[in-house]
Amino acid sequence: MSHSRTITTISLAAAEQLANEAMAHATTKGWKIAVAISDHAGGLVVFRRMDGVLSITTEIAIDKSYTAAIMRRTTKALAERMTSSPDLTMGMANRPRLVAWQGGVPILEHGVVIGGIGVSGAAGHEDAECGEVALAALGLSSS
């Protein structure tokens, strides 16, 4: 009988590629962003911030990636779920690092969450777009 299990998580090389793809997409759109890539447990693997991005944006991007990774859903889906329950909204609001602003996207490979990508600095739907474009470039998905 084994007392361990194998964990699948994002590699550093893939995390770097995702961050680069997200930033490249933002550049083509004229958006200034920060992007964070977390592993399957929400641990920060890679972070990038464009020149001129506010420092608070840094923390928000990191928290979006953390939230997407540990909740196994987009931060947009989490926000939608929270609006259905005042108790859930109160509980989540008291949890540090959980963010329900759009722009956090889980990273799935073969249906397994291997991390989260968080983008902040543009409008919420634009942040999410950067994450989704980066995932598509590497053949990954968010669902």
Image (cartoon, rainbow, N blue to C red):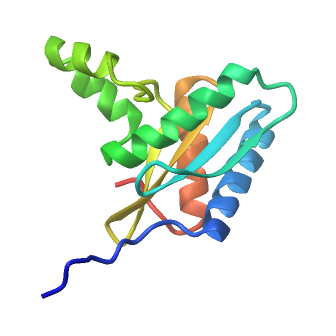
Q: Is 38 drawn above or below residue 113 in the view shown?
A: above
**Residue 8: where, in percent of width, then height?**
40, 72
**Residue 139: where, in percent of width, then height?**
52, 69
| Residue that appears at 40% across and 34% down | 75
| Residue that appears at 61% across and 28% down | 59
Check the image and name the residue furthest to the right. Answer: 51
| Residue that appears at 81% across and 36% down | 50
| Residue that appears at 60% across and 37% down | 119
Q: Is 32 drawn above or below residue 117 in the view shown?
A: above
Q: Is any part of residue 121 visible from this angle?
A: no
For the C terminus, which image quadrant? Answer: bottom left
**Residue 118: where, in percent of width, then height?**
55, 40
Q: Quadrant of residue 98?
A: top left
Q: Is any part of residue 132 visible from this angle?
A: yes
Q: Quadrant of residue 28?
A: top right
Give the left or right position of residue 29, taking residue 109 as reference: right
Give the left or right position of residue 114, taking residue 138 as reference: left
Task: Tally the marks.
Answer: 0
**Residue 2: where, in percent of width, then height?**
18, 85
For the N terminus, which image quadrant? Answer: bottom left
